[in-house]
């Protein structure tokens, strides 16, 4: 009888531990008691900057992507290098990121309102959402409760970030390793509806696709002709619109461009090489029947839960660019 009671007690203890572990996730309203004005403060700060420079929306969104794809959504992309160790921020794909001042300003305001409570990774997730909404894009409820990581390594960014040169197989593997499916890939690629890119990110498609001085047959040749006017061989400074004509507005035009073989990157063109992602692209061409805004919010929530630190893991940074 004593043995039975002991086993029953042990099972209950294990159940409670497992239940506690599973509940240690992010949730909407996480700061409702400890910092109830967090979302209003971040949105006000983001709006202050976006109203003056709408083009900051794209890099803020991209910053959140790049944070979550490397070590999870832990704010590691915000950290500066220390003691000679290069951080994620120093990796070539991250050197074009902008908008760190938005995160720093929001953090400063929150430290005055509720010191030591709100993580930099949560601020970044909120700012990315608010930036999209402020340029006529969708909005979504952001689950909060992330804590900040203490590690940021340049090589991690180089290894784990998707590149504009990736084919569908590589993209599917990269996204899949993080729990994102093929639909998420097609939806999140739609973030390219805003922003600019340097010519070198797609120049091989115009000048040397297979190493023989040829062009990418998957790209509209008339579009290549127009791009060549702006981007000369070896150009590493010029930037062009990823979604010409509406690169400052979050809309469905990206999918129209991709369907016409005018996606700027090889990774954009890759969406037409798979039946499922191609079907998604084509399903978004009618803006009145498009599900993109709803889908984007859902995929962003899903992405925002990748590898989060919660509970007592990590830390709540006092300054987003530095470990405590």
Image (cartoon, rainbow, N blue to C red):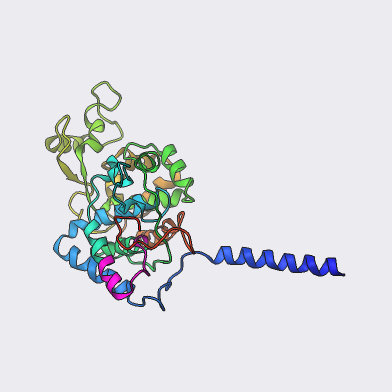
Instruction: In the displayed orientation, state which residue is furthest to the front.
Output: 83
Q: Is residue 15 left or right of residue 24?
A: right
- Who's the residue at 37% across and 48% down the image? 152
Residue 241 location, x and y as percent? 19, 47
Would you say residue 98 sits in the magenta stretch? no
Quarter containing the C terminus:
bottom left
Quarter containing the N terminus:
bottom right
Instruction: In the displayed orientation, state which residue is furthest to the top.
Output: 212
Q: Nearer the viewer, residue 40 or 33?
A: 33
Residue 248 location, x and y as percent? 20, 57
Residue 68 location, x and y as percent? 39, 52
Instruction: In the displayed orientation, state which residue is furthest to the left.
Output: 229
Q: Nearer the viewer, residue 4 or 43?
A: 4
Q: Is residue 4 above or below residue 201?
A: below
Q: Please tell me whether the stretch drawn in magenta is mainly helix, strand or loop.
A: helix
- Segment colored magenta: 107-121
- Who's the residue at 31% across and 52% down the image? 79
Would you identify the image quadrant in which residue 295 lies?
bottom left
Is residue 304 among the parts visible in the rendering? yes
Residue 202 location, x and y as percent? 25, 36
Q: Tag count in the figure? A: 0
Would you identify the image quadrant in which residue 132 lies?
bottom left
Q: Nearer the viewer, residue 128 or 94?
A: 94
Is residue 282 among the parts visible in the rendering? no
Would you say residue 117 sits in the magenta stretch? yes
Would you identify the image quadrant in which residue 94 lies?
top left
């Amino acid at each position: 009888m004593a043995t039975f009671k002991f086993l029953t007690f042990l099972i209950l203890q294990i159940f409670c531990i497992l239940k506690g572990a599973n509940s240690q996730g992010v949730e909407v309203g996480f700061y409702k008691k400890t910092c109830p004005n967090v979302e209003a403060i971040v949105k006000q700060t983001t709006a202050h900057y976006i109203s003056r420079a709408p083009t900051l929306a794209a890099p803020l969104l991209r910053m959140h992507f790049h944070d979550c794809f490397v070590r999870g959504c832990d704010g590691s992309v915000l950290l500066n290098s220390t003691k000679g160790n290069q951080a994620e921020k120093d990796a070539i794909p991250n050197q074009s990121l902008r908008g760190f001042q938005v995160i720093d300003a929001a953090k400063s305001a929150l430290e005055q309102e509720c010191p030591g409570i709100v993580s930099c990774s949560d601020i970044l997730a909120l700012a990315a959402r608010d930036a999209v909404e402020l340029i006529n894009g969708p909005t979504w409820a952001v689950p909060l409760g992330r804590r900040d990581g203490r590690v940021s390594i340049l090589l991690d960014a180089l290894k784990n970030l998707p590149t504009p040169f990736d084919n569908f197989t590589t993209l599917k593997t990269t996204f899949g390793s993080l729990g994102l499916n093929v639909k998420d890939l097609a939806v999140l690629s739609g973030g390219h509806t805003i922003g600019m890119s340097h010519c070198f990110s797609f120049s091989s498609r115009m000048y040397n696709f297979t190493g023989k001085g040829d062009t990418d047959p998957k790209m509209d040749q008339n579009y290549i002709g127009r791009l060549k006017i702006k981007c000369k061989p070896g150009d590493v400074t010029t930037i062009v619109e990823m979604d010409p004509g509406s690169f400052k507005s979050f809309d469905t035009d990206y999918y129209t461009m991709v369907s016409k073989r005018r996606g700027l990157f090889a990774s954009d063109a890759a969406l037409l090489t798979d039946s499922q992602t191609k079907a998604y692209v084509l399903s978004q061409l009618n803006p009145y029947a498009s599900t993109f805004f709803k889908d984007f919010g859902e995929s962003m929530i899903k992405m925002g839960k990748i590898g989060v630190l919660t509970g007592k893991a990590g830390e709540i940074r006092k300054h987003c660019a530095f470990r405590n």
